[in-house]
Amino acid sequence: MEYARKVGLYGLIAEFDTSDRLIHAAEQTRADGYRKLDAYTPYPIEEVSEALGHHGSRLPLLVLIGGILGALGGFGLQYWVSVIAYPLNIGGRPLNSWIAFVPVTFESTVLLAALAAVLGMLALNGLPKPYHPVFNAERFALASRDRYFLCIEAEDEKFDREATESFLQGLDPIGVYEVEN
């Protein structure tokens, strides 16, 4: 780990030619105890997320909280205006006419839930990120065409430059490359 910090090494990346080999390599890497790793593919592959150990997301909870806050905010604003700030008795109806408040409450629920979904997705994915160290890796441009990459970060507790490289070589990749910071 000290070597990685001195040189500015982000990690090691292995190149594979098929998605099946990448999935198998990711499963073996997780089974061997590595935890700070990521995979890069030319198209989304559901099995890769499972092999990397990405389970669940906090995004649904954020959307729920956004929707609840939107509903409470929309209803609360209408209640405050109609009952407290500017009460008008029109046709003998009650000041707290909650049935009339339903459309605005619904719309504010949807609005804040959607905003929470978009902003939460951006925040949880760490976006926007115009630069990532893997862009420095040799042959990484092929990740958007026809190659599959598995990267083990140098910050992983189990990372040791030589041991990790020999482990990745044992997974039978096309090549293993250093990723500079």
Image (spheres, rainbow, N blue to C red):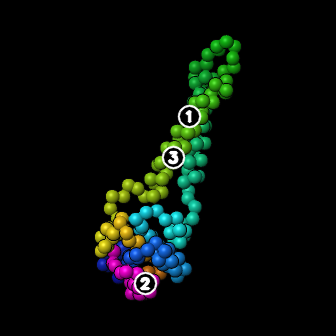
Please name which of the two marks, 1 or 2, marks the residue nearer to the observer: 2
The correct choice, above or below, for 121 with respect to 75 in the image is below
Q: For label 3, count other residues whose C-alpha is less than 10 Å away and answer few (under 14), some (14-19) or many (20+).
A: many
Please name which of the two marks, 3 or 2, marks the residue nearer to the observer: 2
For the N terminus, the image quarter is bottom left
- Give the amino acid at mark 3: Ala
The correct choice, above or below, for 65 with respect to 176 in the image is above
Residue 63 vs residue 85, the one in the foreground:
63
Labels 1 & 2 near each other (Cβ < 8 A): no
Residue 60 vs residue 170, the one in the foreground:
170
Residue 5 coordinates in the image, percent (x, y): 35, 77
Q: For label 1, count other residues whose C-alpha is less than 10 Å away and answer few (under 14), some (14-19) or many (20+).
A: some
**In this rendering, would 95 be left or right of 164?**
right
Q: Which residue is mark 2?
A: 172
Identify the residue shown where x is 67% and y is 26%: 99
Q: Which residue is mark 3?
A: 116
Badge 3 marks a residue whose secondary structure is: helix
Magenta residues span 160-181
**Mark linked to residue 107:** 1
In this rendering, does residue 120 appear at all?
Answer: yes
Please name which of the two marks, 1 or 3, marks the residue nearer to the observer: 1
The correct choice, above or below, for 91 with respect to 32 in the image is above
> CA–CA distance between discs 1 and 2?
54 Å
Identify the residue shown where x is 53% and y is 41%: 112
Earlier residue among tags 1 and 3: 1
Q: Can you tell which quarter of the image residue 83 is in?
A: top right
Earlier residue among tags 3 and 2: 3
